[in-house]
Amino acid sequence: MRLAFAAVALACSGPALATGGISCRPVQGTGPTLHLVIGHAVAPSIVSVRMGDGVAYNSGNERMGSHGLAIARSWLDDRILWLDLADPNLTRFEGRLRAVFQPKVRGRPAVGTFVRNGRTWRVRCVEA
């Protein structure tokens, strides 16, 4: 009987999908903020992005009142965080994030730049 319950439980269970988040903000002053959802599977990947710069932008399922974004390219490993955002039709870039993780700094932030509409901000990204 126990074996039957174990077999049913095993058949009904799915893989555990772990996610995390990273938030990026300008080091000084105001500017665009990014909130990244990171999927942790075989390799970490950026699953979705929310950007705020006075207007709400979301990748994936847009919420009412927000504008669409697409993740054109991304790279995430132990050393670097790169992200290219585009409009939903992939016809123009909306922003480019280039950051390097600082493993010897408490909390292991990533520091770099975010470029949008011809303007560059120095940003700091931390796990959220």
Image: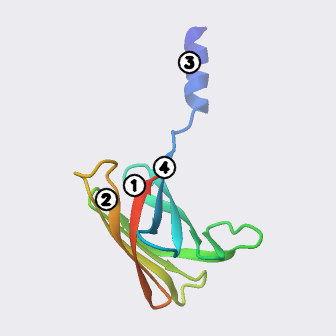
Q: Which amino acid does label 1 sit on?
A: Pro
Farthest-out residue, top: 1
Which comes sooner in the sequence, label 2 or label 1? 1
* Crowd class of label 3 (few under 14; some 14 to 19; many from 20; radius 10 Å): few
> Which secondary structure lies at badge 2?
loop
Tell me if 112 is positioned left or right of 91 in this view: left
* Residue farthest front in this picture: 29
Q: Upstream in the sequence, badge 1 or badge 3?
A: 3
The N terminus: image quadrant: top right
* Residue drawn at 55 percent across, 75 percent down: 70
* Disc 3 target residue: 6
Query: Closer to the N terminus: mark 3 or mark 4?
Result: 3
Q: Residues within 10 Å of mark 2 (few under 14, many from 20)?
A: few
Labelled pair 2, 1 in contact (Cβ < 8 Å): yes
For the residue pair 43 and 63, the one nearer the viewer reads as 63
Q: Mark 4 points at which residue?
A: 20
Tag nearer the camera, 3 or 2: 2
Q: Which residue is drawn at 61% across and 23% down?
A: 8
Q: Which amino acid does label 4 sit on?
A: Gly
Q: Which residue lies furthest to the left in this view?
A: 104
> In the picture shown, does residue 21 fall above or below 88?
above
